[in-house]
Image (cartoon, grey):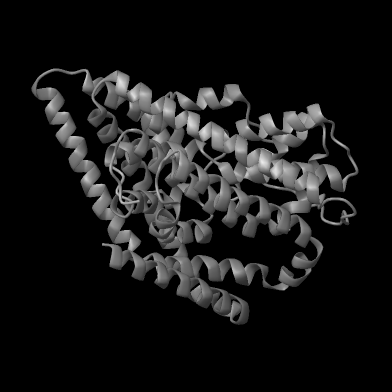
Amino acid sequence: MRKIQLKLHWQILIALILAVIYGYYIPGGIKYVAWMGDIFMRALMMVIVPLIFSSIISGVTSLGTGENLGRLGLKTITYYISTSILAILTGLFMVNLIKPGVGIELGLQKGVEGFHETTSLNDILMRLVPENIIDSMAKGNILPVIFFAMLFGFFISQLKGGNKKSLQTFFDAIFEVMMKMTMFIIKFTPLGIFGIVAKEVSRNAGQLVSIAGSMSIYMLTVFGALMIHAVITLPVIVRFIGKANPKKHFRNMATPLLTAFSTASSSATLPLTMEAVENNSGVSNKITSFTLPLGATINMDGTALYECVAAMFIAQAYGFDLSFSQQVLVVVTALLTSIGAAGIPMASLVMITVILTTVGLPLEGVGLILTVDRILDMLRTSVNVWSDSCAAVTIAKSEGETTNV
């Protein structure tokens, strides 16, 4: 399995390079390759809901008692909130240190689809409990699916006799089938990545030079903060709290990280993340089936960091000097909105409007960051997925598991 996985991530890397070349130099030929990316994304989205539903029920029933579920849930939520706060503080430090918005030209005033949508803590809690679980599944609303699956799995574990065993076996079998379907789709990842990246490059080819010039300091600030979190903060947690080898784990995660970068969707990458964490890093299905689907929905370290930097950048660009209390408000709001952000491309742009409204900044400021959002979206999604995988390893070690890292 390891040899196949190494081969696959090299295929993805080659596909990325070829896609950039193709999209830049042959933009007229995109219609011949874009369909590969569309079908690949549809195939991934097709398996997400049944994979998450079956994996969580299988994982929760394998935990046994409610005490075990509560302990694992507490560890998981504590990790996710802690790393998100660390990510936001890293972004806040970098944006105050570099001040990328000072002196920036305010020439970009574009709108964003869904611009006036807002997300409050109450909205997140209401979204957690579905009115109709079938409707939530059909719409791909992952948070209520996770909540229902956790309840369903918990009450299966409360049954006695043959019914309990039958249901456990049934959902274990469904999960096994879904993993086999996922592995089949993963084989086509290089072709899907080629179609997705080539399409994006051709779409933005004419703007690449001008964008790089006017927004380079802002992009470097976000990139630097993301790298500090991904290369220093998370590995330190894995090494000293999880007692695992972060370098080895990073190598094991090559394929899902490259896929996350290419698709800019942590939800679409989830099947690959689960496969890599289980088969390469050796974390049990009991841990991955609980921590990773939950992480793909609420653990958005990269997104939280980005939202904080973007809000501060817009404030600097408009000449607003935010007080300490306002910056604390930015941190808290970024944490809450990152939990409510969907695991799809550009979802955080809508969430940034919530932060801007909270601290009284002009909503038009979103237009400043639209032109460079796609590349930064790819980077922050990779950090989101990396953090989820580090959570699985760290929590598995805290539960006394023996892993491959």
In the rendered image, which quarter is residue 129 located in?
A: top left
The structure residue drawn at horizontal position 43% and vertical position 61%, both measured from the top left corner, is 254
Q: Is residue 126 visible to us here?
A: yes
> Residue 231 at x, y = what percent?
56, 53
> Residue 71 at x, y = what percent?
37, 24
The structure residue drawn at horizontal position 30% and vertical position 35%, both measured from the top left corner, is 400
* Direction bottom: furthest residue: 25
> Residue 293 at x, y = what percent?
40, 39
Is the N terminus in the top left, top right, bottom left or bottom right quadrant? bottom left
The structure residue drawn at horizontal position 40% and vertical position 72%, both measured from the top left corner, is 11
Q: Is residue 114 visible to us here?
A: no
In the rendered image, which quarter is residue 63 located in?
A: top left
Q: How many marks?
A: 0
Residue sitting nearer the eye, 121 or 404: 404
Residue sitting nearer the eye, 136 or 353: 353
Q: Is residue 242 above or below residue 152?
A: below
Q: Determine whether, in the image, residue 42 is placed left or right of residue 59.
A: right
> Residue 355 at x, y = what percent?
72, 35
Q: Is residue 248 above or below residue 339?
A: below
Residue sitting nearer the eye, 117 or 2: 2
In the rendered image, which quarter is residue 138 located in?
A: top left
Q: Determine whether, in the image, residue 173 is placed left or right of residue 106.
A: left
* Direction left: furthest residue: 162
Q: Is residue 147 above or below residue 140?
A: above
The structure residue drawn at horizontal position 35% and vertical position 70%, both measured from the top left corner, is 7
